[in-house]
Image (cartoon, rainbow, N blue to C red):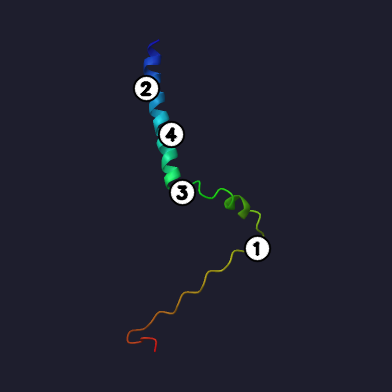
């Protein structure tokens, strides 16, 4: 019977942590798009290359 006095508060604390973790994940948008990541694995196309970086301007070069 004494073990119940210890296990009940521990289980309530763990339940509170689980609810807090779920609320944090919802607020951060972890569940916003559930379909796209699952379909990305089926895409056979190679990844699109990113745009090349713009050339850096030298001192005194205003681009005109």
Give the CA separation, mark 4 to mark 1: 39 Å
Q: Which mark is residue 19?
A: none
Residue depicted at x 59% and y 64%: 47
Q: Residues within 10 Å of mark 1 (few under 14, many from 20)?
A: few
Q: Is residue 40 above or below residue 2?
A: below
Residue depicted at x 36% and y 83%: 58
Which mark is first along the chain, 3 or 4? Answer: 4
Residue positioned most to the bottom? 64
Q: Is residue 21 above or below residue 53?
A: above
Which mark is first along the chain, 1 or 2? Answer: 2
Write down the residue under mark 1.
45
Give the CA separation, mark 2 to mark 1: 53 Å
Give the CA separation, mark 4 to mark 3: 17 Å
Q: Nearer the viewer, mark 4 or mark 3?
A: 3
Percent of width and height locating residue 45: 65, 63
Percent of width and height locating residue 31: 50, 46
On the rendered image, what quadrant is the C terminus found in? bottom left
Which mark is first along the chain, 2 or 3? Answer: 2
Q: Nearer the viewer, mark 3 or mark 2?
A: 3
Q: Nearer the viewer, mark 1 or mark 3?
A: 3
Write down the residue under mark 3.
29
Q: Secondary structure at mark 3?
A: loop
Which mark is first along the chain, 2 or 4? Answer: 2
Percent of width and height locating residue 29: 46, 48
Q: Secondary structure at mark 1?
A: loop
Percent of width and height locating residue 51: 51, 72
Give the CA separation, mark 4 to mark 2: 14 Å
Residue depicted at x 51% and y 49%: 32
Give the CA separation, mark 1 to mark 3: 27 Å
């Amino acid at each position: 019977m004494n073990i119940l006095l210890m296990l009940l508060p521990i289980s309530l604390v763990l339940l509170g942590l689980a609810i807090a973790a779920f609320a944090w994940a919802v607020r951060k948008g972890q569940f916003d798009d559930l379909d796209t990541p699952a379909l990305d694995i089926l895409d056979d196309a190679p990844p699109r290359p990113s745009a090349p970086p713009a050339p850096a301007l030298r001192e005194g070069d205003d681009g005109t």
